[in-house]
Image (cartoon, rainbow, N blue to C red):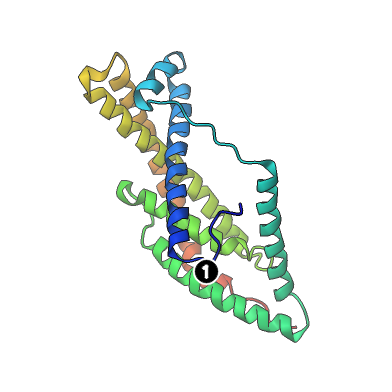
Amino acid sequence: LGDLPLAGDGEPRREQARARRRRLSLLRTAEVGRSLLAERAPRDAVRLAALVFPGALPPVRVSAADVAKVARAVDDWRRRVAASCEGAFAPRAEAEAGLRRGARRRLRRRRGALAALLPPGWKSLHRARLAAKRVRYALELFERVEPRARLLLRLLRSFQDAAGTAHDLAELSARLHAVAGANGGNGPGVASLARRVDADAALALSKARRAGTALAGPARRLRAALRGPETR
């Protein structure tokens, strides 16, 4: 973790992080796509994976120590947020005010971006999923001091899951159609499978739209949910 960018390191480090995220995103697409193929065509999964995702997946290993380090850091930050918002001392009250001001600014921007994309269609699905992720990340740190945020967090997670499934199926569908259209489909069954994945993707999008509709109301009330108790 020592070579990952930290806050304030500047644009070169941020671009380094973006490049890593893009690389991980491509690896995830291939891994998830192979899994979806195996579910839908178990007897032909190896051949189809070689056509749709040529090349072997490189081994990616994350040490258990690094995962534990990140988990400890996040949990420590959550405890600090809770401590700053739950004491009777003036420094804690001052910290609470600063934290809430910053949270309101971030969440106001991110809530607005998300609300403009709900419920999503095919063109806005990926952007809506990313916007929901940003709102959830900004809100999760305050879950322990804002119980009213828990409903919104649950809805955000449900929407992300549904939108992620629809997005994965749409990506797999596009790859299958590309393979089916090249060189006569590169063998039997690809075009048929592409149509089945199209149908699955349409159902997944409908589910994501329902989850987005359920999220729209609580998202509009986000700022009210962040108003904390008076200093004791």
Task: Describe the element under mark 1 as helix, strand or loop.
Answer: loop
Spot occupied by residue 229 in the image (x, y as percentages of width and height): 67, 78
Q: Identify which residue, 174 or 46, lies in the foreground.
A: 46
Residue type indicated by callout 1: Gly
Q: Residues within 10 Å of mark 1 (few under 14, many from 20)?
A: few
User: Mark 1 highlights which residue?
Assistant: 8
Spot occupied by residue 6 in the image (x, y as percentages of width and height): 55, 62
Residue that sits furthest to the right in the current view:
88
- Does the image show residue 227? no
Q: Identify which residue, 208 or 81, lies in the foreground.
A: 81
Spot occupied by residue 16 in the image (x, y as percentages of width and height): 45, 54
Residue at 29% of width from left, 14% of height from top? Answer: 187
- Does the image show residue 78? yes
Residue at 28% of width from left, 22% of height from top? Answer: 191
Relative side of 143 to 104, left or right: right
Relative side of 23 to 178, left or right: right
Please say if 191 is above or below 224: above
Residue at 32% of width from left, 46% of height from top? Answer: 122
Please say if 71 is above or below 145: above
Quadrant location of residue 90? Answer: bottom right
Spot occupied by residue 215 in the image (x, y as percentages of width and height): 48, 57
Please say if 95 is above or below 119: below
Q: Identify which residue, 196 or 98, lies in the foreground.
A: 98
For the C terminus, the quadrant is bottom right
Residue at 70% of width from left, 45% of height from top? Answer: 65
Residue that sits furthest to the bottom in the current view:
90
Q: Identify which residue, 85 or 14, lies in the foreground.
A: 14
